[in-house]
Amino acid sequence: MPRLRDYSGEFRPELKLSDFSPATLAQLSKLYQKLYVALDGFWYLTVKERLGNKEALACDIQAWERVCRYEMSKIKGGLKIQGDDVAALMKALQLCPWFQLMECRMEVKDRSHGLFTVSYCPTLAALEKEGEGRENEICTLVEPRILKAYAACFNPDIEVRCLKAPPRVNKDDICCRWEFRLGGGR
């Protein structure tokens, strides 16, 4: 039986994701990624409305530090990513749901040094549209902690350094750039 391109036909009580074509699965994966990121945004805004931005930031950091460990465990195990260096970390980051929604470039200079440059970030786009200036807090307080939590899942000695963060000069500027290093040295 041919793979489904959509689910416009009759209800299928035994439907499995494997019934869909690869293109439809990729489309569905992109939708799931957007839902994942949207849930984070709605959660944050709800805490902010009820308890204020300071508490929302604290809760966001704590929740993401927990999610990072869970997410990396599942990605590393499910795709058999091995190693304790920057190259292994970058492989796993490529597969994170939020990563898939960004436009970015990863460079592995060597197994202990890498760069991560984001040219489009849906979170930054939403924060800039909101116009409250929260991108400074999210990108300079929350993101370093999240990226360090991801890195620590591979090796607690991987250092994370922000090379460029918002605010941007203009919308054509990159969103951010991060450096990952194992073993110190700059």
Image (spheres, helix red, strand yellow):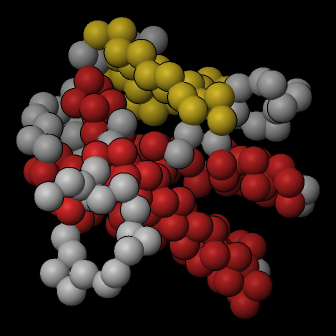
Q: Quadrant of residue 113?
A: top left
Against 40, residue 21 (above or below) is: above
Task: Answer with left or right where residue 14 lies relative to residue 36.
Answer: left
Task: Answer with left or right where residue 166 lies relative to residue 8.
Answer: right
Against 152, residue 134 (above or below) is: below
- Given the current orientation, which residue lies at the most extreme bottom position? 50
Task: Answer with left or right where residue 75 lies relative to residue 139.
Answer: left
Task: Answer with left or right where residue 141 lies relative to residue 12.
Answer: right
Question: Residue at coordinates 66% horizontally, 52% vertically from top-left?
Answer: 123
**Residue 12 location (% of width, % of height):** 25, 81
Q: Nearer the viewer, residue 74 or 109?
A: 74
Question: Residue at coordinates 29% horizontally, 10% vertically from top-left?
Answer: 110
**Residue 30 location (% of width, % of height):** 46, 53
Q: Quadrant of residue 42?
A: bottom right
* Total numbered labels placed on residues in the image: 0
**Residue 112 location (% of width, % of height):** 28, 18
**Residue 111 location (% of width, % of height):** 24, 16
Residue 22 seen in the figure:
yes
Quadrant where the C terminus sits is: top left
Against 101, residue 34 (above or below) is: below
Against 121, residue 169 (above or below) is: above
Q: Nearer the viewer, residue 46 or 181?
A: 46
Residue 29 seen in the figure:
no
Quadrant where the N terminus sits is: bottom left
Question: Residue at coordinates 40% horizontally, 62% vertically from top-left?
Answer: 6
Question: Residue at coordinates 32% horizontally, 84% vertically from top-left?
Answer: 11
Q: Nearer the viewer, residue 155 or 105?
A: 105
